[in-house]
Image (tube, grey):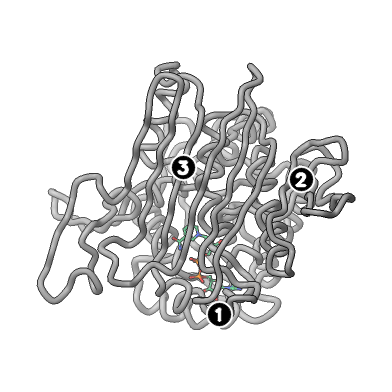
Amino acid sequence: MGMIFDETYRPFFERTQREGLYDRRFGDVSVPLTSVATRTGTRADAYRKSAGSAIHPFVSHSGNDAVDKMLDAGVDFACVATPDNRHFEAAKKVLDAGAHLLIEKPSVLKLQELDELVALARRKNLLAKVVYHKLLDPDHKKLRTLVVDGVLKHINTGYCSLLEPKSISGGQFAEWIVGRNPGTYVACHYIKLIDFTFGGRLKSVNATGQRGLVGPHDGPTWDSTQMRMVYEYEDGRDAAFDIHTSWVTPDNFPGYVEQEVQFRFDNGVWNGHSRKRGVECTVEGETPLKRKITMNNHYNGTFLEPWGERSQRGYGVEVLERFARELAYVKFGGSAAESQQRLTEVQALSYNDLAADRQSVAAVQALEAILDAHAKGEPDCVVRINDPKGGLVMYRPGVSEPTVLYSGRV
Ligand SMILES: NC(=O)c1ccc[n+]([C@@H]2O[C@H](COP(=O)([O-])OP(=O)(O)OC[C@H]3O[C@@H](n4cnc5c(N)ncnc54)[C@H](O)[C@@H]3O)[C@@H](O)[C@H]2O)c1
C-alpha cells in the first residue's frame, strides 16, 4: 500500500466500488477490495480512515504471514505492489493459493523466477499478468499504431530517459533502497515499450552507473544508471537502445519526473516528451515544490469533471481496469464449458502476460548482474542473449570463462 497504491489502485478500487464493471459479454460485475496484506498495517489503517465509505470494508492483514492470511481468507485475484525485489515470493503464494495474479513492473528479477510463475499459472489455469502502465500512454499507443501500420519503417536506434526526484530515493523508498538501482525500477518501462512496440530478438545488454549520493560511492546502491540493449530483427539488421534513469534529480525540478524518448527509423523520427505535452502552470508560493509546474494529466490526474464529479483517471488507472475486465471476461463472458478457451485467449495478450515478459526480464536480470559485478569491482561486463554458452551469459573483461546467468533459451 505504498505510492503506486495511492496513485492507481486506490482510484481504481474506489471507482469500481461505486460503479461496478460492465460489459455486454460479462454483465455487471462487482470488484470489491476485500483484503490487503502489508507489513505493519499502518498504511491500511490510514487508508481505511481517509477513504471511509468510498471503499468496500476490507480486512487488513499484517505481519510476516500477512499474505498467507489474506489468501487463506479467499480472494479471486491479488495484486503485488511491493518493492521490486520482493515480488516473486508473494506472487508465487498468490498462484499457489489458486488466485489470479497481477504484479507491478518489473514482474520479477530473474528468468528462473519467471519460468516458475508461468508454469504454475498454466498448471492451475490462472491469469498471471504484469502492469506496464506506460504501454497505455496514448502517445505510446500512437507510436505502436504507426509502427504496426507500417507508417514508421524499421527502427534503427532509440534513447529514453526517466529521471525521478531525490525525494523518491531519500524519502519514499529509503526503507528498501540499499542495494537497489533506478534502472530496474523505471528503465523496465522502456525495456517493455521497446520490446512490445518493435518486436525483434534481444542480443546483448551492457550498463554502467553512478554512486555517491544515495549511498557510498563504492557501495551497491545506485544514483543513476545507463543501459544499452541491442536487438536484431528478422531481416538481420540491428537496432541499439540507450536508457538513462536516475532518482537524484533535485526536488525543485519543475515536473514530477522527466520522461523523454527518441526513436529513429529508416524513414522517420519520433520525439516524445511527457512534460512538454502542453501545460505549464505557475502558482506563487506553491510551484515547483508543493505543486509541479509541468503536470502529467494523462497518468492519474485528479479532475473536477464538467458534470461536477471529482475524479482521478488516466492510463495508470485504465491499465488496472483492463486487467479486471480481462478476468471478468474469462470468468463470466460466456458458458463455463468455454472458459478454458477464454482463458487461453486472454493469456495470449502479450502486452501484459507473464509468459510474454521473457526478454524484458532477461534485460532486467542482465542489468542487475552487470551492476552487481560493477559494485564488486568488475565494471564493463556485457551480457549476451542466446549465445552458444547459454540463454543469458555474462562476459567479464579479461576473464575468459563467462558466467551463465540462465542456461535455458530466453
Ligand atoms: N511509484 C510509482 O510511480 C510506480 C509506478 C509503477 C509501478 N511501481 C511499482 O510498484 C511497486 C511498489 O512501488 P511503490 O512506488 O508503491 O513503492 P513504496 O515504497 O511506496 O511502497 C512499497 C510498499 O510495499 C510495502 N512492503 C514492503 N515489503 C512488503 C512485504 N514483504 N509485504 C507486504 N508489503 C510490503 C511497503 O511497506 C510499502 O508500503 C514497485 O514494484 C514499483 O516498481 C511504482
Q: Determine crowd level at label 2: few under 14, some 14-19, many 20+ residues with C-alpha closer than 10 A.
A: some
* Circle 3/circle 2 CB separation < 8 Å: no
Q: What amino acid type is highlighted by mark number 1?
A: Glu
In the image, taking residue 78 as reference, residue 365 lies left or right, namely right
Is label 1's Cβ within 8 Å of ligand 1?
yes
Label 1 SS = loop
Q: Marks 3/2: CA distance? A: 40 Å
Label 2 beta carbon less than 8 Å to ligand 1: no
Mark 3 sits on what residue? 159
Q: Which disc is residue 175 wearing?
A: 1
- Residue depicted at x 58% and y 80%: 216
> From what the image shows, is residue 5 above or below residue 105?
below
Earlier-in-chain disc, 1 versus 3:
3
Q: What is the x, y in percent for residue 231? A: 62, 33
Residue in the image at 34% along x and 56% along y = 18
Q: Which residue is mark 2?
A: 124
In terms of sequence position, does the residue under pointer 3 or pointer 2 come before the other? 2
Residue 261 is left or right of residue 281, and the answer is right
